[in-house]
Image (tube, rainbow, N blue to C red):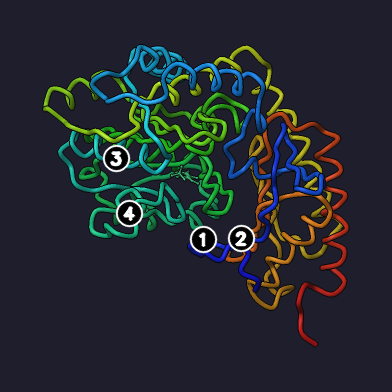
Amino acid sequence: MVDLLPHVFGCHSIVKTDIVRADGIYLYDKDGKRYVDFEAGIWCAALGHNHPRIKHRITEQISQVVHLAPQLTSNLAEEATTALLEHTSFPDGKAVFLSSGSEAVELGIKIALLYTQKKKLLTFSRSYLGAYGFAGKGLSPDCWAQVDIGACVKCPKEKCGVSCPHLAAFRLDETAAFVTEPVLASGGMIAPPAKVVSFLANEVRRSGGLVVVDEVTTGLGRTGKWLGIEHFEIESDISAFGKALGNGYPVSAVAMKREIAERVEGEGFYYVQSHQNDPLGCAIAKEVIAVLHESNLISRTKESGKYLGDCLRKLAEDHTVVSDVRGLGLVYGMELKADYFDDARSFEKIFDMMLERGIVIGVRPKQHLLRFLPPLVIGEEDILSMCECLGDVLTEIDNCGVGRSG
Ligand SMILES: Cc1ncc(COP(=O)(O)O)c(C=O)c1O
């Protein structure tokens, strides 16, 4: 493979380096070729790239103050906090602004452990939660327990109970936090069944544990509601935000109920990182929330999400390679049949085939999944033309697979 950026550490693939401009749902390369970005960057540019109000607010704030020491935080932190909390179920709670979704999830979990004085954490298998090791489940196998999301999705029972063989082994009474994503986007676009989410949330809470909701991908409109958790009949105690909150700028937040914050503050909890409550990040977050508030973008997302889902399902009917289409709002996945592909590289070729046609989609070879999380401002016309291109690509695969030998 050609090394496009020979001095850039190669911890992921790089296929294109000449994107020089972005505007709304479009990216432009140096030759002026236009691409429709069905990944919204990496699910961040919810209002569209280079949104005029965000651009204006950034320019304005940069000329005032970008960064401050935590003990000198500007009043923007309070303003952004109240704006964010207004859309949670605990508007009188507290929040802190950070730099990445991983950090927000991790801090939320730390707070839950401290508040409950319990040691175990529960989540679904295939949750992502973050990359920093602690919240990312891999490095702390002793405290994490995982409910098999595959078994829950297939389970035909109407209600969940302690007698369920998939749930019986968990010490829900010892659990500090049930940590869940409203849609497991990185985990394969799987919405956990409401019955199991309610059961686990209620059981954990009954013994003094908390519900931590990772809204990094689903928060701020992406599912057609302000928060992903609104699709369920449970309340969050602590919520983590990221991605859309900065519309591409790295700002995240963790928000929590007031009694949790006050108890943990009272115990002298200390947490400082370089860009905590930075004026620039807070100004952007506040403006993103204001734009969402003042526009009809969230209800529009519900409609455009339905349109995207219908178009993808129509493709599934017409193409034998498609095994499933699933999603909510503008978080959609299309699973393809593994036996049409020789290997991961041959699956990745779908990315190139779509790119040639001027469209960026997400491609996850391990899950045989195509992902669609465009900016929320996407219109039906662009959804339709993406689906037409995808239809051509799927026809090619139906006929002979991609990279199939023989
Ligand atoms: C649900 C969820 N949580 C947390 C993260 C981590 O966010 P970040 O990449 O900003 O650290 C991601 C990133 O994809 C995510 O999808």
Query: Residue 30: x percent and y percent?
Result: 76, 48
Q: Is residue 377 visible?
A: yes
Q: Is residue 74 above or below residue 203?
A: above
Percent x, y for residue 210? Answer: 29, 34
Q: Which residue is labeled 4 in the image?
A: 133
Left or right of residue 269: residue 285 = right
Q: Hey, what amino acid is under mark 3? A: Ile
Q: Which image quarter holds the C terminus?
A: bottom right
Residue depicted at 41% across the width and 12% down the height: 79
Relative to residue 10, is residue 207 depicted above or below? above
Using a 10 Å C-alpha cutoff, classify the residue at mark 2 as few (fewer than 14 neighbours), some (14 to 19) or many (20 or more).
few
Q: Secondary structure at mark 1?
A: loop
In this figure, which residue is indicated by the disc labeled 2?
14
Which residue extends farthest left?
A: 267
Give percent across and percent down for residue 86. Answer: 45, 14
Gap between marks 2 and 4 measured at Cα: 24 Å
Above or below 344: residue 378: above
- The residue under label 2 is which amino acid type? Ile
Where in the figure is residue 84, as x and y percent of width and height?
A: 45, 19
Q: Residue at x 38, y 29 (%)?
A: 236
Residue depth check, mark 1 versus mark 2: number of the one nearer the observer: 1
Mark in front: 3 vs 1 = 1
Mark 2 CB within 8 Å of ligand 1: no
Identified by mark 4, the residue type is: Gly
Q: Give the left or right position of residue 1, taking residue 207 as reference.
A: right
Residue at image mark 1: 8
| Mark 3, residue position | 109
Dot 3 or dot 2: first in sequence order is 2
Question: Going from the N terminus, do you reach mark 1 or mark 4 first?
Answer: 1
